[in-house]
Image (spheres, helix red, strand yellow):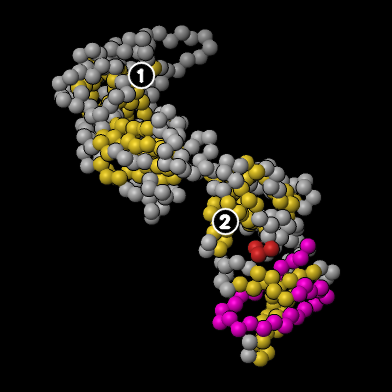
Amino acid sequence: MVFETYFQPTFAWETFDDAVDLESGTDIIVDSITTVSNIDASLDIAPAISGTVTGPDGSTPVEGLGVVAYSWDIEGWQWEGSAETAGDGTYTIFLRSPGSYRVMFGAYGNSNYREQVYDGAPDLGSGTDIAVSNGFITSGINAIMSSGASISGRVTGPDTVSPLEGISVSAISPGDPNWTSYSYGSPVLTDSNGLYTISLLSTGIHRVEFVDPNDLHISQVFSNAAFVWSETAQDILITNDETNITGIDASLVPASQVHGRVTDEGGLIPLENISILAILQTSNGWNAVTGIYTDNEGYFAMKNIGSGVYRLFANTAEHPEYLPEYYQNSYDQEDAQTITLADYEIRTNVNFALLSATNAAANIVSIIETTPNNFAIEFTGFTAQTYRLQEAQTLTGAWHDVGDQYGITTGSNWISWSSTNSTTYWRIRFVP
């Protein structure tokens, strides 16, 4: 039996008979005909935590700030009680039972200050325990709030002049090696002039990310880096709460999109987790720039890519029962069909129908150098299928068709080929 005091918070909770929780309470045995009487309770005055919250000057009271008490159990930090500061900055939190608590200031309410945990800690994990007892108010749990440091700048289009409104800007701190810890106060949106300010920031290193929620511009990390973990991403150091860093600007370029679907050859079976890779034509050749996986219906939506000439590749590593291919039905990067994307273009119906590898796979059995630079390549496959030899200079490099097509017969098949390269890799591909 638990006596709860939701409507009388100045009294402590109790479990019959004078226990602080269910585990230590007394069992009450009842049956269908007996009335058990004298299940009484004399409730203690609830333990409480009180204090005063002021602004950065240490004297101006902060009104309307949410203060929350937490306790720890095996499932993590649990809310136990809360209060808002009054006009004079004071608060009192009544608690259900004695124990050890930590108090967070700024968990809700007045948003002009950076949240903190008693005594001046940035989070619950590094806060100070506060022990409370029934019948006593633990006072003096005060806080001097900080408005924190700030980072500000301007976001424009590729001309570096036209402002971009509604761009999401976030400060990210190195909470782990992947830079996934978004700093308090993030994200914010740019105004009609492209301006933004991220406030309430803590000291330490931050990186700033710019994302267009409408996918009309390519995301960027200051300064001109593709990802927050990129080596070219610039660290922004905040040394104290009064630091206000300006000029963290970005010029975003237009984004294009490619949408499509991947199925089996018959177009009936959607293929999930097929990696679609976008390979961009550059002055240095063809370079992979981004990729995305198909969903459970085989669809993919490749966003946040720039204009240019691309080749798309469907990688079937997650579905080895299907043959990988370039769009449209090409198996050689050199011969693959290109897709030219303009600024802001949304290209649809870029679909793949992948052939089954079950009746097409071929294996190289042996390679014999018959004379210097001349090789006999033995392979097996499936009768009545056609194959081609492919060559590459590295295992991860581009594969190219070489020689003629080869019809296959039962048993071993041989290809004679010459190569003067010091390092050459070969494989056999199915020709649909």
Give the side of residue 249 with respect to residue 275, left or right.
left
The residue stretch that appears in magenta: 404-432
Q: Is residue 351 visible?
A: yes
Instruction: Pick whichever, 204 or 254, lies toward us.
Output: 254
Give the side of residue 328 with respect to residue 133, left or right.
right
Q: Residue at x 45, y 18 (%)?
A: 29
For mark 2, give the secondary structure: strand
Looking at the rendered structure, which numbered label has been put on residue 280?
A: 2
Q: Residue at x 34, y 49 (%)?
A: 234
Q: Is residue 62 magenta?
A: no
For mark 1, give the secondary structure: strand
Q: Residue at x 56, y 71 (%)?
A: 394
Q: Is residue 418 magenta?
A: yes
Looking at the rendered structure, which numbered label has been put on residue 375?
A: none
Instruction: Pick whichever, 1 or 320, lies toward us.
Output: 320
Disc 2 vs disc 1: which is toward the camera? Answer: 2
Give the side of residue 58 with respect to residue 378, left or right.
left
Q: Position of residue 249 (x, y in %)?
A: 36, 41
Give the side of residue 222 with respect to residue 219, left or right.
left
Q: Neighbour class for label 2 at 10 Å: few (<14), some, many (≥20)? A: many
Task: Give the quarter of the figure containing the C terminus.
Answer: bottom right
Q: Is residue 81 visible?
A: no
Name the quadrant containing residue 362: bottom right
Q: Which residue is mark 1?
A: 15
Q: Give the answer, above or below, for where 194 lies relative to 253.
A: above
Instruction: Pick whichever, 153 or 333, lies toward us.
Output: 153
Type of the residue with mark 1: Thr
**Extreme-bottom residue of the structure:** 371
Type of the residue with mark 2: Leu
Mark 2 and mark 1 residues within 8 Å of each other at the beta carbon? no
